[in-house]
Image (cartoon, helix red, strand yellow):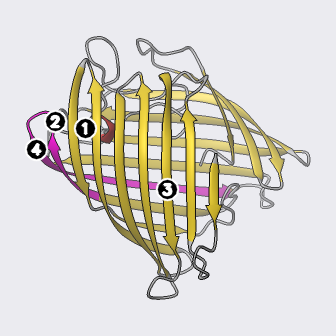
């Protein structure tokens, strides 16, 4: 449920209050959690091409990977340099209780994310040509947890490109890549929710959410300090409103701060699309090509818009 005021003080200020109960009926969590948030956005702050946004969120989730109860606040300044390029800088403060592998730790996190996005695709939900690039660096100070304090930097780069093979947007080859790395701290010094996990619709389809990762002796995912993934997807329109896809996802998650190391997890799948005026409705079915203890034989994904 959400409530939005799109003109709080008469200058286009946007306030959104939302509340949700998460993972009801899903397979990623042991129990339902909650997500309560308030976001206030000021457009044209100090200059026409600049936006200032504040967010406060209370979150609780009972994932099989870890349990998290958190309260955090962020402030983010975004500037639109060109129609295609935007940059942002922010600051965040978070208090969280994490339980993983039968151990609970209380953390206080201070972060200052800096990022940029470049997008020259022709459609937000259904791109058929162009490419997108985004990157973010997040220096973080952690107080509490494994040994009392830690400083680490998380870097992430994501890119995707879309090749119109037919010339009319009906046959498209879509490619996606991701590289992430964490430096400055050991795996146990980095809170569980800040680590990298493979598996799920946003990383490696076919594997259970977060399951394509290094595991503890009890076969539950531990996460890692580095990750790399890649996707090749062929999209074909069929008639006026239908379409189909075939895809191959692959990735690695490493306990060390070294991308392109660790076990390789490939997955393959097929999907159907029904195209509406607000974007395609997506149904994908994928299977893992590597047996992971505790994983399922296949995964089903439903969403609005293409997978990437």
Residues marked 3 and 2 touching at CB (< 8 Å): no
96 in magenta: no
* Majority SS type along the magenta span: strand
Q: Earlier in the sequence, mark 4 or mark 1?
A: 4
Residue 299 seen anywhere in this rendered image of the structure: yes
Contact between labelled residues 2 and 1, with CB atoms less than 8 Å apart: yes
In three-dimensional space, the C-alpha distance between marks 4 and 3, rounded to whole angstroms, equals: 29 Å
- Badge 3 is on which residue? 38
What secondary structure is found at the residue carrying circle 1?
A: loop
**Badge 1 or badge 2: first in the primary sequence:** 2
> Residue at the location (52% across, 87% down)?
48
Nearest the eye: 99 or 209:
99
The percent position of residue 156, horizontal first and vertical second, equals: 35, 53
Q: Residue at x 30, y 42 (%)?
A: 194
Q: Horizontal and vertical percent for residue 268? A: 58, 28
Mark 3 or 2: the one toward you: 3
**Residue 162 lies in the magenta stretch:** yes
Calculate the distance from the C-alpha at mark 4 to the C-alpha at mark 1: 11 Å
Camera-nearest label, 3 or 1: 3
First-in-chain label (4 vs 3): 3
Q: Percent from the top left, x then y, of residue 143?
A: 15, 45
Q: Are marks 4 and 1 in contact (CB under 8 Å)?
A: no
In-front residue for pair 266/58: 58
Which residue, given by chain and number where applicable, does mark 4 sit on?
149
Q: CA distance from mark 3 to mark 1?
A: 24 Å
Residue 258 drawn above or below residue 110: above
Q: Which residue is mark 2?
A: 145
**Element under label 4?**
strand
């Amino acid at each position: 449920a959400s409530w939005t005021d799109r003109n709080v003080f008469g200058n286009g200020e946007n306030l959104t209050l939302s509340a949700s109960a998460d993972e009801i009926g899903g397979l990623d969590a042991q129990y339902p959690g909650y997500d309560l948030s308030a976001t206030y956005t000021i457009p044209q702050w100090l200059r026409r091409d600049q936006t200032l946004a504040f967010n406060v969120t209370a979150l609780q989730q009972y994932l099989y990977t870890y349990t998290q109860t958190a309260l955090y606040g962020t402030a983010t300044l975004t500037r639109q340099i060109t129609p295609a390029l935007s940059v942002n800088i922010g600051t965040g403060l978070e208090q969280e209780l994490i339980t993983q592998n039968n151990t609970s730790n209380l953390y206080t996190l201070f972060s200052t994310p800096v990022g940029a996005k470049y997008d020259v695709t022709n459609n937000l939900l259904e791109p058929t040509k162009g490419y997108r690039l985004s990157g973010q660096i997040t220096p973080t100070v952690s107080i509490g947890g494994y040994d009392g304090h830690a400083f680490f930097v998380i870097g992430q780069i994501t890119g995707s490109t879309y090749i119109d093979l037919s010339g009319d947007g009906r046959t498209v080859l879509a490619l996606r890549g991701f590289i992430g790395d964490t430096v400055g701290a050991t795996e146990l010094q980095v809170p569980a929710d800040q680590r990298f996990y493979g598996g799920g619709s946003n990383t490696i389809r076919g594997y259970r959410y977060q399951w394509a990762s290094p595991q503890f002796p009890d076969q539950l995912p531990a996460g890692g300090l580095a990750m790399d993934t890649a996707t090749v997807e062929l999209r074909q329109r069929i008639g006026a409103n239908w379409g189909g896809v075939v895809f191959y996802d692959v990735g690695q998650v490493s306990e060390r701060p070294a991308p392109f190391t660790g076990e390789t997890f490939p997955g393959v799948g097929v999907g159907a699309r029904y195209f509406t005026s607000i974007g395609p409705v997506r149904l994908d079915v994928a299977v893992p090509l590597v047996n992971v203890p505790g994983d399922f034989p296949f995964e089903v994904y439903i969403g609005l818009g293409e997978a990437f």
